[in-house]
Each structure stands twice: as structure tokens, then as C-alpha cells.
Image (cartoon, rainbow, N blue to C red):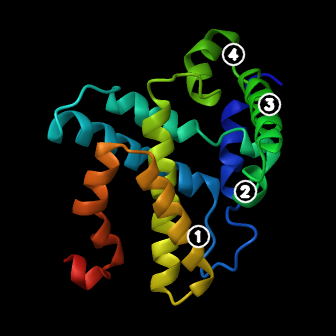
Amino acid sequence: MANEFYALLGRMRYITRWGLMRNTFSENIQEHSHQVAVLAHALALIRREILGFEGPDPERCATAALYHDASEILTGDLPTPIKYHDPEIRAAYKRVERLYGERLLKALPEQLRSHYAPFVLEDDPELEPVVKGADKLSAYIKCIEEQKAGNTEFDSAAKLTLDAIRAMNRPELDWFLVHCLDAFRMNLDELN
């Protein structure tokens, strides 16, 4: 593979998420990655500008979030109950994600690989908690949207995801939950 990276990224729209759940509307990893990028950027800004904490650069967080599921272009989306069922499965899947992340990087011109590597391989420990928080927040927002549409299939996922968000103990996530989350329960007329 050489110079096929961007064409491969275009295939993100074909990889659907929430494969074990009945969905009112489908979500692909391209849509998800965009939302995670928006949320990661917001969380980093909230941390720095509203809460006054040190933290990673918001633009780097957004960039990392855009690529956080890139390996799934080649692996597909492994459902959460399987991925997190036991530590051995999780570790094996992490190795598979890394292997396919490295394969994706080989689809870039050599001069660009080092610029993408920390994002595609999720190798920046400073960005990781913000992107993970945004990823969980995106999952919770999906649950809210499904519940708004009357889909009770997402009730237990919503509870588990909210519990996981709270367990992260990230002040920017807590702030977002209090100050921004209710708007996701509104319709367009209520938002206006």
C-alpha cells in the first residue's frame, strides 16, 4: 500500500457502530469520529478556559479524535460487550488495532507517517484521557438520541455509559454533563 491512506479513510462511512443493538438510525465511524473530534476539542477547551486546569492542546485533541477509530476501517467495529468482556480479549484486540493502525500508516508517503502516527496509533498519553472521555460522551449522546426516538433497547447502555463517564473523574466531563448535556434531549424548536 502506498498513498492509499485518504481513500481508506473515506471508507469510514461504511463501518457501522452498535452492531448488536436495534438502532432507530445507524451511525458509522466517520460520523462518530467527527462528533468525538468536536467533543474532544470542547472538553479540552472547557478544561483549560472554564475550569482553569492545565491540559492538552484542544486542536491536537480534535485531530486525535478524528483518527481514534481509523483502524476499524480494516478491522470493523468490535462490539463493546465483546471487546471488554475479559482482559485477554481486550489486550488481543488492542494488538490487532495497533497492527492495522501501522498498516494504515504504510498507506501514507513516508514523509507524512510520523505526523499521523501519534493519532492513528493513539500513542499520545496526554491526549488519551480527553479523547476517551469524548468517545464515551459520544456513545452516551447516541443512547440519548435513541431513547428520544422511543428505542428502549439503549436504556441499559445509557446507564452503563453514564456510569463509565462518571468513573473517569474528569472535571471537564462533569462540567459538560451539567451544562451541555440536556440540550441533546431537546428538539430543534426547543434549541431555537
> What numbered label is drawn on residue 157?
1
| Circle nearer the N terminus (4, 3) | 3
Q: Is residue 17 above or below residue 43?
A: below
Residue projecting furthest to the top = 111
**Which residue in the protein does label 3 denote?**
95
- Where residue 15 is drawn, which disc sits there? 2
Front label number (1 vs 2): 1
The reply, left or right, for residue 113 in relation to residue 169 is right
Q: Residues within 10 Å of mark 2 (few under 14, many from 20)?
A: some
* In front: label 4 or label 3: 3
Q: Please name the residue that numbered disc 4 is placed on.
A: 109
**Residue sitting nearer the eye, 49 or 59:** 49
Amino acid on which the number 1 mark rests in the picture: Ala
Q: Amino acid at mark 4?
A: Pro
In primary-sequence order, the first of circles 2 and 4 is: 2
Q: Residue at x 22, y 33 (%)?
A: 48
Mark 1–mark 2 CB contact (< 8 Å): no
Mark 2–mark 3 distance (CA, rounded to whole Å): 20 Å
| Residue type at the position of mark 3 | Arg
Marks 1, 4: nearer the viewer:
1
Does 191 sit above or below residue 54? below
Residue 121 location (% of width, % of height): 65, 26
Whole-Å distance between the Cαs marked 1 and 2? 20 Å
Secondary structure beneath dot 2 equals loop
The first of marks 1 and 2 along the sequence is 2
